[in-house]
Image (tube, rainbow, N blue to C red):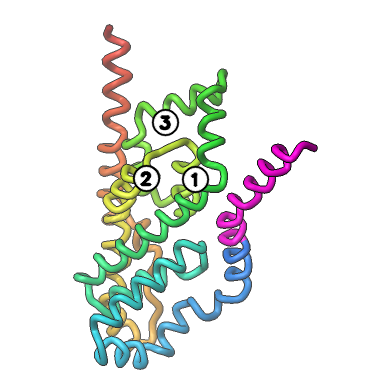
Amino acid sequence: MTPIETGANGNSVKRLIPVIVIALAAVIGFFTLRDYLGFEALRDNRAALLLWRDSNFVFAAIGFIAIYIVIVAFSLPGAAITSLTGGFLFGLFPGVLFNMTGATIGAVLIFLAARFGFGERLSARMDNAGGLTGKIKAGLAENEISFLLLMRLVPAFPFFVANLVPALVGTSLLRFAWTTFIGIIPGALVYTWVGSGLGEVFARGETPNLGIIFEWQILGPILALCALSILPIILKKFRRSTL
């Protein structure tokens, strides 16, 4: 192997380090943090959390956002509970803004890690590929904004997948960031709203209904937004068929 080839391989491995670190953290977190990032932990530590918030609101807000960023960036369990905590500690507003900020920055960090590791090279290969791969890449590029918003709006798309796929197909960082922030608004509102009422839930000794997002009065408007996001794609196809 020539020195150039060795150097290229070494650089490739180094570029994958952020992705490897995220993957390892996600696996370790799945097995070690589930008991610490669940509803029971929030219920048992609610008094301490409220005291932490009241002692220094600004510091608590910054600390909460930082924790949310870490949870999302390393794909750790507990994102839903963290959203509830944001509502519990800070109310619907500014809690929803704190939740959206932490989730968006965390998503951007995953995006950058994937882009740095192998996104640019994979995107270039897809650009040069023909057949089905080339068509998928072209379709995503043509309807990118609609596709990005749809991935955020549809609850069936795992958050990690919605962060990873755009990096692999060459989406710009700015477009990824703003579609993420806008697209997570409905879900963030629902979970923050549920979290803001946790005081009464705790008083009754109950557990919050995290499946509320799948109830029709909540899911219906989200599906309507999904329909709006794919409307440009449908209109493009219709215009082509009439030409």
C-alpha gap between disc 3 and disc 1: 17 Å
Residue 93, given in percent of the width and then of the height, sits at: 19, 70
Q: Nearer the viewer, residue 77 or 118?
A: 118
**Is residue 236 shown left or right of residue 117?**
left
Q: Quadrant of residue 35?
A: bottom right
Q: Residue at x 47, y 36 (%)?
A: 169
The stretch in magenta equals 1-23
C-alpha gap between disc 1 and disc 2: 10 Å
Label 3 residue SS:
helix
Mark 3 or mark 1: which is in front? 1
Residue 146, given in percent of the width and then of the height, sits at: 32, 36
Q: Which residue is disc 3 drawn over?
A: 140
Label 2 residue SS:
helix
The quarter in which the N terminus is drawn is top right
Amino acid of disc 2:
Leu
User: Above or below — where is 71 with respect to 138?
Assistant: below
User: Above or below — where is 87 with respect to 216?
Assistant: below
Residue 201, given in percent of the width and then of the height, sits at: 32, 82
- Sequence-first tag of 1 and 2: 1
Q: Residue at x 30, y 82 (%)?
A: 60
Q: Residue at x 63, y 45 (%)?
A: 12
Amino acid of disc 3:
Leu
Q: Which residue is disc 1 drawn over?
A: 115
Q: Which residue is disc 2 drawn over?
A: 173
Q: What secondary structure is the magenta-colored segment mainly?
A: helix
Q: Residue furthest front?
A: 3
Label 1 residue SS:
helix
